[in-house]
Image (cartoon, grey):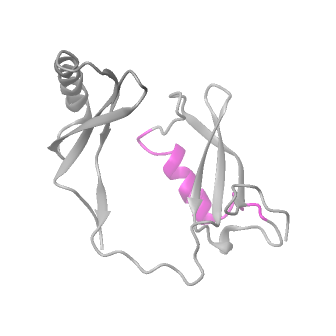
Amino acid sequence: MALVNQPAGELSIHYRDETGSTGSTKFHFPFATLASVVFTQADLLSAALNAVTGCAIDGYTISYTKSEDTPETPDDGARVENKGRFVYRTANARTSLFSIPGIIEDVLLPNSNTIDQADLLIAALNTAVVGGALNFCSADGSDLTAILEAYQVMAGGKKPSNR
């Protein structure tokens, strides 16, 4: 099993009309194309589209997709509603968070909904988030620097009480 790329990436140009309704145009590009090249071409394409539409172009999205060629079977009892929420400190002293569906019980501290940040699996995850060649960042572009808090949440997104 391996993650394999789709043959093409996708560029989606986003439009808005006078009523506030939205639409989009999708284009595809070879998967191996560098993102910097796609951005340059998308800027040129957006300008050309802007000249032929009465709608406002609000922006665009570029995506590259990989899919598992032999998906694994989920663990018994695994539920996407049972999430691990990770809150990270950012370089600009703010916070950013992400959730992992189906968090396993093995990474929780005993009798708690707190994720054990010293657990080897969580340490490996943290290294992948902040210790790799790519600096993952918050939506405002500030680098993620360290886990501030990690805990389990259920379907409503609320932190459950201790068990």
Query: Residue 151 appears at what percent x and percent y?
Result: 72, 57
Determine the residue positioned at 26% across, 18% down: 54
Residue 34, magenta (yes or no): no
**In this image, 39 relative to 142: left or right?**
left
Considering every residue shown, the one lying at the far front of the view is 19
Front-most of residues 105 and 132: 105
Query: Residue 65 appears at what percent x and percent y?
Result: 29, 52
Relative vertical location of residue 48 with respect to residue 119 in this rendering, above or below: above
Residue 124, magenta (yes or no): yes
Determine the residue positioned at 62% across, 66% down: 81
Relative vertical location of residue 153 with respect to residue 107 in this rendering, above or below: above
**In this image, 84 relative to 31: left or right?**
right
* On-image quarter of the N terminus: bottom left
Query: Residue 83 appears at what percent x and percent y?
Result: 63, 62
What range of the chain is rendered magenta?
113-134
Front-most of residues 11 and 4: 11
Quadrant in the rendering for residue 90: top right
Front-most of residues 89 and 65: 65
* On-image quarter of the C terminus: bottom right
